[in-house]
Amino acid sequence: MKNVTAEILTIGDEILFGQILDTNAQWMSAELDLLGIRVVRKTTVGDNEPDILHAFTEAESRADLVLITGGLGPTNDDLTMPSLAKYFGCKIVENASVLAHVKDFFEKRGRDFTEMNKRQALVPEIAEVIHNSLGTAPCTWYERNGKIFVSMPGVPHEMKNVMKEFIIPKVRTFFQTPVIYHKVIRTVGIGESFLADKIKDWENALPHHIRLAYLPSVGHVKLRLTAIGDDRSQLEKDVQQLIDAFIPLGGKYIYGYDETSLEEAVGQLLLAQKKTIALAESCSGGFIQHKITQIPGSSAYFQGGIVPYHNQFKIDVLGVKASTLEKHGAVSEECVKEMAERVREKFNSDIGVASSGIAGPGGGSEEKPVGTVWIAFADGKQTITKRLQLTQNRILNIELTEIAVLNLVRKSLNQ
Amino acid sequence: MKNVTAEILTIGDEILFGQILDTNAQWMSAELDLLGIRVVRKTTVGDNEPDILHAFTEAESRADLVLITGGLGPTNDDLTMPSLAKYFGCKIVENASVLAHVKDFFEKRGRDFTEMNKRQALVPEIAEVIHNSLGTAPCTWYERNGKIFVSMPGVPHEMKNVMKEFIIPKVRTFFQTPVIYHKVIRTVGIGESFLADKIKDWENALPHHIRLAYLPSVGHVKLRLTAIGDDRSQLEKDVQQLIDAFIPLGGKYIYGYDETSLEEAVGQLLLAQKKTIALAESCSGGFIQHKITQIPGSSAYFQGGIVPYHNQFKIDVLGVKASTLEKHGAVSEECVKEMAERVREKFNSDIGVASSGIAGPGGGSEEKPVGTVWIAFADGKQTITKRLQLTQNRILNIELTEIAVLNLVRKSLNQ
């Protein structure tokens, strides 16, 4: 297979002038990277025909595949379709199947179908039309001299759907890209360089057809294994073998694979062990409960929680002893231990967890500077506590506390 | 003044391959738009010299101002500086002032200064060096034939700082852009088209030198007034006059101006009225408390809260009557009213608020479909309740509940 190159072209004044953030281009790049197709350029132009045509010419000169989003609305400032017709030297025609789909789309939603909407069915005569089931703007495909242009709607969920369902398989067939199999190992609680050090022999021994990428983000490191070959089931086996060899080295940091988030992984553990959880959050201010309850079905294991932001309510509402707060203060091992134990009792849950710390920017002292956080896990048999020393940044401290708490729950449940 | 055009050029494989999202380009576009400079193209190229040089040539052919980010690290794959030197036909030299800054930067942080770090001081001979106080990669400025190239670090907070402190004022002077004054009016609780209808006479009567932009986002509509002239204090007066005329039309929807968020605006109201707040969140799962506690200093008015996710804890922990839940269910006016009143008592606060609903995707019924949410505000004198009918999307329902609750508090405090 030759090396296939791609250009991503975004059309729209709203992107050019900074009114909206272009997240499509990143998503498409990452998808192409997974296919082994090299993106060589990303371009954004506004809603004007000369710039669009110029961008088409440039893109065709340097890439085999040109993925275009945006400029497909029914109004006069949407110029992608007429520009494509001009570029490929053909007429614009009304496509009966698109028209039927648009009519049906409006009917099903009880909305009026107007003359304006009818314009969505106008496409360049030579285009192959690809179905956009989630919206009214059609997706179109063009071939010339072994190169491909694809025009897609700019609405992210419509673009993603049409890419996954139609464009990616079609591109793979057209360019005869090899079989590529990816597996992401998600880790938490260890920094990138420490993890790299632990697994260096394993990494150095990776076979030639499998490569490794480190993808770090706040509090997490993801490892992506990419296997290239022509037999998918063999590639899956090869990757699984590598993961089996990885587990003795770094397995205790793995919380999941592929798209599983940490809060989902913890939820799955709780479900599997039929355990329930309750939270007492001080410095994290409800953020951990928010993350847990974002997951559909979390009511099966999440009982509830308390945010006793002021010390008085750690006593009155949660039941921490006044003497504990007097003697040790709220940001202390003793306090967070009682918080976890009391919230467990209050909500009649198997597990109680707690956070208490100084998120900043104010409130620090020499003994307990900004970023000092205590967390605890209680399950009735034992209470585990941990002191964290985080950053000067309030928002980051809240996020890092959330990750540390969920990781403490994960590790304790795995024991 | 002639119309000044700009191109934004991002350099880096990590952006091209979709490993990170380019938020810089949007931010810079929006800043240029505020200056009245028209962005005509955004381009991303990878870490390779031919592509970078080609992009420079193209950018110079179509724009007066080229803003470049990325590719400034000290490693061999960072090619922006050598490419700029080649493009402008000059040598790379060690800049003494940059070297001193980089050494000082490492010393202050107690980190070792290596030969590798020394390379950060190598800049094209003809460049004007601009100070980057937040990092080690220097910012450089180039002038040729009335056009400007600026190279900046890709780290967002470094780029933003150098843009605000140095580049924007320098660009304004160079191109003699007019004085532009902006004011953003932030509204909540009214849709874009309804707001546009309410203010259409006001909008139609805007003077020629002031234009209006609608900037809608989830639950909010921002209105940006942009005044262009040559006397800043006169522009400020003109805009203030328009705002004074806006207030009788849409004033009750305004929660703040410019960068003020809704949770900040509510916090400021509570502070000004010396009132405290507590929350009982069911369907919003802690998200409202999280938003409130993200604001530094929120402990002055936020007492705490309870997330009684299961009905039993609405009774046991919060003190809602069992008969209320039996008779009306948890997603009911009666339940949410009691929740707000009980949490107010529990946390001894001036104000108690509550949410209870069906976030989805499961749990809906014919009578109470997914997206049904009740919210309440209690201040000891009265309890106000409201029923919301939201969407099928769990994440969106949580966010819309948060906005509705904070808006209910805002409106009640403003009465």
Image (cartoon, coloured by chain):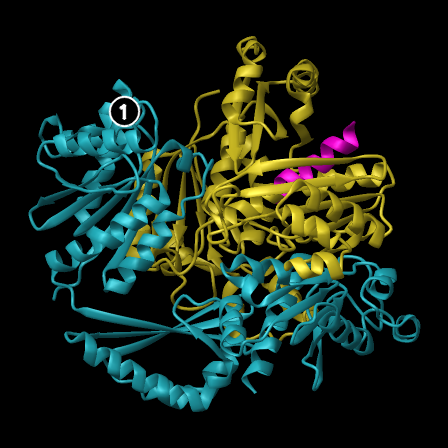
Chain colours: A yellow, B cyan
Residue farthest left in this picture: B145
Residue closest to the eye, B218 or A119:
B218
- Give residue B387's position: percent from left, percent from top: 72, 77
Quadrant in the picture for residue A261: top right
Q: Position of residue A107 (x, y in %)?
A: 67, 70
Task: Give amino acid for label 1.
Answer: Asn
Relative to residue A191, is residue A353 depicted above or below?
below
Q: Measuring 67% from the left and 40% from the top, which residue is drawn there?
A: A333
Q: Residue at x 83, y 50 (%)?
A: A300
- The span picked out in magenta is A402-415
**Quarter of the picture holding the C terminus of chain A:** top right
Q: Secondary structure at mark 1?
A: helix
* Chief secondary structure of the magenta portion: helix
Q: Residue at x 75, y 76 (%)?
A: B341
User: What residue is shown with label 1?
Assistant: B117
Side of A396 where A56 appears, left or right: left
User: Relative to A104, does residue A158 appear above or below in the rendering?
Assistant: above
Magenta region includes residue A406: yes
Structural crowding at the residue carrying mark 1, measured as other residues with C-alpha within 10 Å and reported as few (<14), some (14–19) or many (≥20) = some
User: Does residue A150 show up?
Assistant: no
> Is-magenta flag for residue B230?
no
Comparing A294 with A384, the one in front is: A384
